[in-house]
Structure formats: C-alpha cells, structure tokens
Amino acid sequence: MSKTNFAAGLEDVIAGTSGICFIDGKEGKLIYSGYSVEDLVKHDASFEEVVYLLHHQQLPTLEQLNAFKQALVEELSLSNNMIELMRSFVPHVSPMVALRSAVSLLQTEDRPVREMDQEDLRSIALRLVAKMPSLVAAIHRIREGQDVLQPDKKLSLAANFLYMLSGQVPEPLEEKTMNIALILHADHEFNASTFAARVTAATESDLYSAVTSAIGTLKGPLHGGANEAVMKLLFEIGDVDNVEAVIQRKLENKVKISGFGHRVYKTMDPRASILKRMSKEIGEKKGNTKWYELTEAVERVVFEKKGLYPNVDLYSASTYYVLGIKMDLFTPIFAVSRIGGWTAHILEQYANNRLIRPLSVYTGHQRREYVPPEQR
Ligand SMILES: CC(=O)SCCNC(=O)CCNC(=O)[C@H](O)C(C)(C)COP(=O)(O)OP(=O)(O)OC[C@H]1O[C@@H](n2cnc3c(N)ncnc32)[C@H](O)[C@@H]1OP(=O)(O)O
Ligand SMILES: O=C([O-])CC(=O)C(=O)O
C-alpha cells in the first residue's frame, strides 16, 4: 500500500491472524473455532462451554466443562469492598460508564501476578468472565436502591445473571433465551471492541486495561450501543402504523437506522435470524408480542426502502425488553457475553504478539517557520 492509499475505517484490511472465529459475510455464517453458532444453539450448548471453546479453541470434555463451570461460579461474587466502591459512582453515571470504571477497579483487588505467565493470564481471563454478570447486576441493583445479591452457585451463568438482576430464579425459557443471547454475542472476529482490546494487549499492557479499552469501544451506538438505540427507536415509533413514516423520515434525513447494516455481512446476520425466533418465542410466552411485531415491521420497511439487513442488535432489543430488562442494560449485557471473546483474543494476542501500529496519510500544513507568540 502506498503512503497515500488507505482504507477508510480499515475496510477490508486484514489486520492479523486468529484461530478463534470465522465470519462468512457473503453467506451469513458465523463459526466459533469450527462450530457454527446455529449448531451450538441447536445442541443446547451452554455459554460456559462456548467461552471454554473460545479460550481453548477446543470443546471441553464433560470433566473439563464441569471444572470450568465450577471455577467460574467460585469467582462470581463481588467483595464488599468492591460493592462499597461502586455505590460511590454507580448512581451518577450510565451503566456502561459504571461497568468500565468497575472493571478498572477490579484490578486493585487482584493478587500479584507473574508477568505474561500463561496460567496467571488464564485465571485473570476466567475471573473477568465471571465478574462481568455480577458487576452488571450490581450496577442495576445499586442504582435501583436494592441490595446486591450473592450468586446462587447451583445456577448456570445465564440463570445466575438473571437471578442477580431480579432476585427471581428464571423460568427455563428465560434462562434458555439469555443463554442463547450470550452465546450469539460472544465473539465476532476483529470487531471494533475486540480490535481495541488487541491494540491495548499488543503494547504488553495488562488484561484489565485491554478489557477497559474494549468496554469503552463497545459503548458507541455504531457498535454495541446499537441495541439500546434500537429500543429507543421502537419507543419512538410506538405503533406498527407509524413504522413507514418514521423510517421514511429518518432515511430522508440520512439518519442511520440502528440494528441495520454491517461492515462484514452483506446478507442477514445469522445471529439476527436466531434472535428473531427467540424474540417471538419469549414474546408469546410472556403474552407480549408487540415489540417483536414492531421490530418485524421495521425490518420489512427498512429492507424495502434501503435494502439493508438486520444485524445482531435488532432483535436482541425486543428479546431483552420482554425479559423485563431495562434498556440501558442492553449494552452491558453485550459485554457480559463479549468478555468471552475479548479475553480469548487478548490471550491469543499475547501468545503471538507484535505491536499494532499503523500509519496515517498526513493532511496537515506543509513545513512552516516558527514565529514567537508576540509576533503572530
Ligand atoms: C454489534 C455491532 O456492532 S453490529 C452494528 C451495530 N450498529 C448499528 O446498528 C448502527 C447502524 N449501522 C451503521 O451505522 C453501519 O451499518 C455500520 C456502522 C454498522 C457499518 O458501517 P460501514 O461499514 O462503515 O457502512 P457505511 O456507514 O459506510 O454505510 C454504507 C452505506 O449504507 C448506508 N447504511 C449503512 N447502515 C445503515 C443504516 N443502519 N441505516 C441507514 N443507512 C445505512 C449508509 O448510509 C451508506 O449509504 P450511502 O452509500 O448511500 O451513503
Ligand atoms: O463485527 C462487527 O463489526 C460488529 C459485530 O457484529 C459484533 O461485534 O458482534
């Protein structure tokens, strides 16, 4: 590439190798270390099993899976000190800002680690995966003025997350829905937040710093923040009869419709197809299909008017909303899942590292002579 050629937004640039995840953007396929997400969902894989797969690029044996689940459950709870620290800032900031800050604070409780020691790195990665649902649930309960709940060690990670949020052990379909949502969001190759994590890791900085970079990157509405933006759009539309006019107006004003379009998929995002089914199923179970139907109408109109396909964020919004989750927790839930992928990529980056440092095309002033302030 010459110094004046560049790819805006790094479009189509191959920035490295990875054995974790493969996306076929033309065919709409998402494969984690050889296993399609459809297959993992069809066979009722657990989120824990998928995290193991991402971390080891191998499905665990039953014994390995049980040990991994046990290790995760043992790490779920937050210290009293951590909860007290969180009380001081959670009520004043958005959940994503609180989550980014809380992850940073978690490091202050870590035992001393051996630098770049594989075993220590893996145990921090596991700790981060386990703490994420507990942090999000604690953020929610603190800002609602409720007690922070301890995890129930008999529950899966998906069920524990819903339990720590609401204080109710979830129904089987609620647990299944959350488990599938967590699997579907767990990894996506060199997406913006994972790439941010890898850039930080490539300086040989620590795992907490890399994950903090990733959370800050996920927060934006062009990336993970789009699921909350979809719910806001559904509220703005309000009724199926308004879809056509609201979408038309937005498109005329060149406003991007959240939950549509993708840098890599040129067809339906395979995760959106599965979440569409889940949104319908949980809506029917809860006797509230309004949000599913509204989303489906938006999908139809956006396709007719602009030829755009849904991405993962479109149907996750109605799915979470019908589960009774507040919309400003949608993006934090993305982090509860994506921590699996982020940590896998950070470990992979450490294992085969080179500093990530691209170039820019300079568009500033030509060389000039310095003039002292009093002569300008
Ligand atoms: C988990 C995730 O991160 S999935 C993505 C979540 N983000 C969203 O849902 C936000 C809405 N979508 C978008 O903004 C974009 O589609 C992105 C950011 C996902 C991808 O962006 P890019 O690959 O840079 O595509 P870009 O923004 O250049 O769009 C290409 C064309 O499609 C149009 N387009 C793309 N997405 C949308 C959209 N959601 N609504 C309206 N038009 C869109 C653009 O306006 C542009 O059209 P033009 O050529 O007529 O100007
Ligand atoms: O891959 C991307 O660019 C965005 C995305 O869908 C994800 O991170 O899940």
Image (cartoon, rainbow, N blue to C red):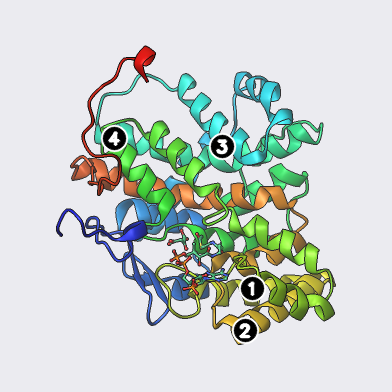
Can you identify the residue that label 4 sits on? 119
Query: Which label belongs to residue 316?
Result: none
Can you identify the residue that label 3 sits on? 76
Amino acid tagged 3? Leu
Amino acid tagged 4? Glu
Q: CA distance from mark 4 to mark 2?
A: 52 Å
Question: Taking the image as drawn, is residue 241 in sight?
Answer: yes
At 31% from the left and 70% from the top, the residue drawn is 34
Q: Quadrant of residue 227?
A: bottom right
Disc 2 versus disc 3: nearer the observer: 2
Q: Please tell me which residue lies in front, 356 or 172.
A: 356
Whichever of callouts 4 and 1 sits on the residue coming sooner in the sequence is 4
Q: CA distance from mark 4 to mark 1?
A: 51 Å
Q: Looking at mark 1, is its residue's CB closer than 8 Å to ligand 1?
A: yes
Amino acid tagged 1? Leu
Q: Is the residue 40 above or below the residue 197 in the image?
A: below
At numbered mark 1, what does the secondary structure look like: helix, strand or loop? helix
Disc 4 versus disc 1: nearer the observer: 1
Q: Is the residue 44 above or below the residue 357 in the image?
A: below
At 62% from the left and 49% from the top, the residue drawn is 155
Disc 3 versus disc 1: nearer the observer: 1
Can you identify the residue that label 2 sits on? 305
Can you identify the residue that label 1 sits on? 251
User: Residue 150: x and y, percent?
Assistant: 67, 34
Amino acid tagged 2? Lys
Q: Quadrant of residue 285?
A: bottom right
Whichever of callouts 2 and 3 sits on the residue coming sooner in the sequence is 3
Q: CA distance from mark 2 to mark 3?
A: 46 Å
Q: CA distance from mark 2 to mark 1?
A: 8 Å
Question: Among all residues in the image, which is located at the extreme front?
Answer: 375
Q: Is the residue 330 above or below the residue 246 in the image?
A: above
Whichever of callouts 2 and 1 sits on the residue coming sooner in the sequence is 1
